[in-house]
Image: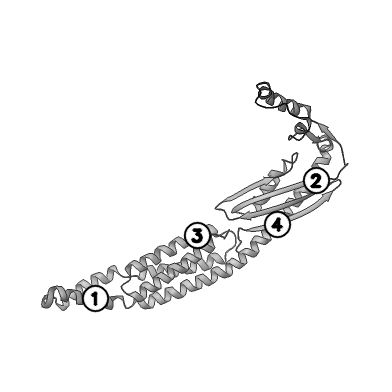
Amino acid sequence: MSLSGMTGFGRAEAAAGAWSWAVEARSVNGRNLDVRFRGPPGFEGLERVAREAAQARFQRGQLTIGLQAKRSEGAGSVRLNLDQLERYLAAGAPYVASGQATAPSLDGLLALRGVIEAADAIEDPQAQAALEAAMATSIVTALDGLAVARGEEGRALGSVLDGLVLRIGELTRKASALAGGQPVIIKARFEKRLSELAGEAATEERILQEAAAMAIKADVQEELDRLRGHVEAARSLLAAEGGVGRKLDFLTQEFMREANTLCSKSASGALTSVGLDLKAVIEQFREQVQNVE
């Protein structure tokens, strides 16, 4: 069984020089692959690394990758980005002049994004590259951990789905046994009804002709054959490699279509009951398939 789920969590921590960081990767269900990255200022280039690593490992799911980094106190210097500060002041000047805002305080200005920068992370490209490479390794490690978690969920899902497919197969066989009695039930029902309406005019030949026509319309053999085929297809998909969630989702729709037709053609309460049981199990199957990558 090689199924993978879409829910999981992975984490990695590391340190290099004056820096320490932690990466957390989380995922939940999603029809497609949606990757979101959040990192500290100055490390925007790691978003591409995160996206490519996620795309190499997953096909579906909403992924959130968060990188938190901090520098030990007193390590390295910082500098004031005057250009960025001037831009903030220029943007706020009209509002201050019109009385819509008060003049900004120094501590407020220094807290704005991009005003204070780590000098060595910007002025030493080699140090920056080495630090980003180390952080990229942690991103990959966290995503590998997420893949393991999703694989564990997939194994649990596989066991549940296997049991549901087995139950669908059992109900299909039960429906097949009951379907053999459809013509007799239809003939008896039609004979009774026709006798009530036509009396002695209802000949045996006419009863047989009309009952045969009705039996053809109520024949469920094709639906049962397709249900059996879908069961085999489901078993093959559950044993296949790679993401099969979309295929299983489509197969669930086919399962339900045949079960609905089976119920609509049923001429007996027993067969209808089996058809309703089938629909209930297929719905359980559909709910679980939503978690499969």
Instruction: Compare residues 231 and 84 and report the one nearer the observer.
Output: 84
- Location of residue 29 (image quadrant): bottom right
191 vs 149: above or below = below
| Residue count near mark 1 (Cα–Cα under 10 Å), binned few <14, some 14–19, many ≥20 | few
**Element type at marker 4?**
strand
Q: Which residue is mark 1?
A: 189
Closer to the N terminus: mark 3 or mark 4? 4
Instruction: Compare residues 105 and 188 and report the one nearer the observer.
Output: 105
Marks 4,1: beta carbons within 8 A: no
Checking the image for residue 70, the label placed there is 2
292 vs 39: above or below = below
Q: Position of residue 160 (x, y in %)?
A: 56, 69
Residue at (12, 76) in percent of width and height? 199
Checking the image for residue 249, the label placed there is 3
Q: What amino acid does circle 4 point to? A: Gly
Residue at (78, 27) in percent of width and height? 82
Q: How far is the residue under mark 1 from the one under mark 3?
A: 39 Å
**Element type at marker 2?**
strand
Q: Position of residue 149 (x, y in %)?
A: 67, 61
Q: Which residue is mark 4?
A: 10
